[in-house]
């Protein structure tokens, strides 16, 4: 996550956006794929407050309206010394609210800790079902569900193209930009 200013989408760039980017019929042809967050001031602020480190956030959107998100936390001073990175993941569905607003309904949360010795792959679990059964698995999922509320589910979309999206996170009064890395998940 970078912390350089994005500014506002000006009149010269806005016409390049897909029309009515919040509508399912507008977003669906370009949504499928892996999207990497490249601008999110709230995440950059959080990264700095938590001691600095590397924070990488991606979204995997599927054509059927399901999605998952993985936030990889590395090199933070609070991560145990035997741990290389920690993935915080969530999954749910995405869809339309209006012409310019989309909705993400999260329903599951999980984590994966990657050790420095390389005994575990440095990739997130694809889904909650892939996480070995345990009490922490159930606790993390239950805690995640406490944060799946409407104010963190609705996102006005100001720009959408085949490989770039800009949307607002109104709860925190911030704008997020993500670039598509791959067309097929």
Image (tube, rainbow, N blue to C red):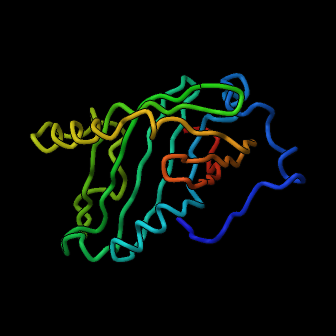
Q: Give me the residue at 27% from left, 77% from top.
A: 77
In the visual, does 74 lie left or right of 39?
left
Q: Give me the residue at 83% from left, 47% from top.
A: 14
Residue furthest left as drawn: 135
- The image shows residue 7 at horizontal and vertical percentages of 72, 63
Q: Quadrant of residue 32?
A: top right
In the visual, does 108 lie left or right of 162?
left
- The image shows residue 40 at horizontal and vertical percentages of 55, 60
Q: Nearer the viewer, residue 144 or 79?
A: 144
Q: Give me the residue at 29% from left, 35% from top.
A: 145
Task: Give the answer, above or below, for where 1 lies relative to 146.
Answer: below
**Quarter occupied by the C terminus:** top right
Q: Give me the residue at 41% from left, 49% from top.
A: 70
Task: Give the answer, above or below, for where 49 lies relative to 41.
Answer: below
In the visual, does 28 lie left or right of 111?
right
In the visual, does 33 lie left or right of 50?
right
Q: Quadrant of residue 106?
A: top left
């Amino acid at each position: 996550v970078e912390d350089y200013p994005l500014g506002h989408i000006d009149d010269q760039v806005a016409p390049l956006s897909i029309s009515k980017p919040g509508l399912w019929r507008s977003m669906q042809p370009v949504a499928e794929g892996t999207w990497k967050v490249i601008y999110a001031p709230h995440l950059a602020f959080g990264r700095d407050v938590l001691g600095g480190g590397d924070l990488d956030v991606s979204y995997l959107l599927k054509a059927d309206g399901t999605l998952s998100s993985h936030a990889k936390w590395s090199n933070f001073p609070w991560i145990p010394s035997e741990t290389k990175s920690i993935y915080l993941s969530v999954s749910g569905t995405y869809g339309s609210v209006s012409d310019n607003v989309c909705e993400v309904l999260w329903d599951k949360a999980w984590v994966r800790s990657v050790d420095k010795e390389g005994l575990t792959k440095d990739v997130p679990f694809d889904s909650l079902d892939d996480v070995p059964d345990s009490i922490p698995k159930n606790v993390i999922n239950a805690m995640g569900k406490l944060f799946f509320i409407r104010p963190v589910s609705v996102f006005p979309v100001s720009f959408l193209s085949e490989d770039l999206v800009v949307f607002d996170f109104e709860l925190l009064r911030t704008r997020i930009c993500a670039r598509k890395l791959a067309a097929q998940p």
